[in-house]
Amino acid sequence: MSFLKNMKVRILLLLAALFAVAVYRNSGEAGVYLSQCVFGVLTAIFAQCAFFGNASKTSLQSAAITGMIVAMLLAPGIDGRILWVAVAAAIASKSLARFPSGPHMFNPAALGLVLATCLFGNKINWWGLSNPYIAIVVGGFILYRLRRLSLVFSYILFRMVGAWILNAGSLSIDTLALHNLFFAFIMVVEPKTTPSDRWSQWRFGGGVGLLSALSATLISGFDGDLLALLAMNLVRPLLRRQSTCR
Amino acid sequence: MGASRKELLFRVGGVIGLALLLVFTMWTRQRSVTANHEGGDAVKEEHDHSNPAEHGDVKGGELSSGDVELKPSGKVVDGKRVVDYEAFKFGFSPDPLVVFSGETVVLKLKSRDVEHGIMIPEVDFNSPIPPSKTTTKSFTAPVKPGRYPIFCSTYCGADHGNMRGVMVVVPSEATEKPHHK
């Protein structure tokens, strides 16, 4: 059971659990869900080999996570070409869009999905959030071990504050509770594209939350969370630099 | 084997794998489109016969025998089916949305609570549904009768991933005469 200590394996198991619940709830279409995930993972693995020229266990696990996330966010039964483009773009971004200091700039899944949305329209459905409790409990445990929980708390808090400010005229619990749990516990926290120290994490997550609330209000029909994450990915080196100066 | 040669092999293998997956998905898509056209032909043939569900010609969407007796949603205005369609946490109304095959469907979209979205992948239809506002959008129903999923495309809360509806496309002949078995 030593493989369970591997964070990437844990994340894959979390995704598998959410996938299993989705299939259970839609058992009549299990084949559609399964083929979409298998296709996403295979595309990611081939893209990883094509863009990086290696197939180490770690890199394949990363690719599988990206492929699975993209597959679990696009609507079930979607045209396979859209999934292919989104996943291939996600993996390509890890190779092509990098900071001079080394790490890739953008959350790969978010970039692939935003690019696919630009090309084919919004096909994002977030069916991967089949059970919020699994996301919170298992995701929370993984993030606690990864020291990334500050990102989740800051995102949720500032998403609420943003919604509260922007919807002051017609405020409701529904509006306040529009933070996306799959996004918070699985996407925002990707270790390579987020700061590692707590103060920077609060600023990063807070920025994602505020921008997310803002874009959800201003841009209808586009996934504001993903745009906000990409924007904060871009300014991440600045956060770290300012944090170091303190 | 040198490291650079190994890297090259992985790169070439990856590119070939990606290309094969793309070809595969284009092939399955083409098959789906062809089946849809065949479904359309089958519908035309049904006008000379009886209930299409009994013939087993309806592929993919799995139209059940009870579906052909469903009453179409909304009303026909100027040859188009106009339906008041509401989204709420976490469902759609009316559900199922029942339309005739191949007809133009105009949806008057409203939300009861927060912003939702509607996505019908089969007809490439997608629209946001903002709260406290009616949005009118139209699409052409698939030629092939069947049941097609409808999803919410805007994150609307913790159970958003399970928010879905169904569009039932029925052949017009069968619906106009539901009891002619």
Image: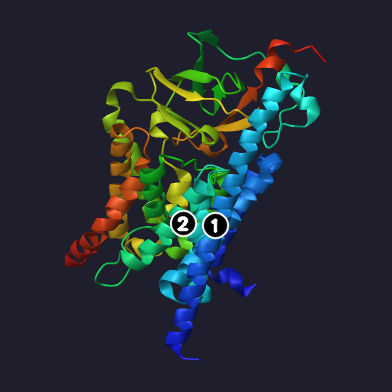
Q: Circle 1: is it few (<14), some (14-19), or many (20+) Cα within 10 Å?
A: few
Q: In the image, residue B169 lies at what x, y percent?
A: 63, 24
Chain holding disc 2: A
Residue A11 visible, this orientation: no
Q: In the image, residue B142 lies at what x, y percent?
A: 57, 28
| Secondary structure state at the residue bearing disc 1 | helix
Q: How many marks?
A: 2
Report, in whole angstroms, how far the alpha carbon at label 1 lies from the one at label 2: 15 Å
Residue B29 visible, this orientation: yes
Residue B23: image tag: 1
Residue A87: image tag: 2
Residue A6: image tag: none
The answer to whether B91 appears left or right of B3 in the picture is right
Q: Residue at x 75, y 21 (%)?
A: B66
Chain holding disc 1: B
* Quadrant where the image shows the C terminus of chain B: top right
Q: Residue at x 66, y 40 (%)?
A: A25
Residue type indicated by callout 2: Val
Q: Is residue B140 above or below residue A72?
A: above
Which quarter of the picture shows residue B116? top left
**Viewer-side label of 1, 2:** 1
The answer to whether A187 appears left or right of B72 in the picture is left
Towards the viewer: A156 or B140? B140
Q: Is residue B20 above or below residue B121?
A: below
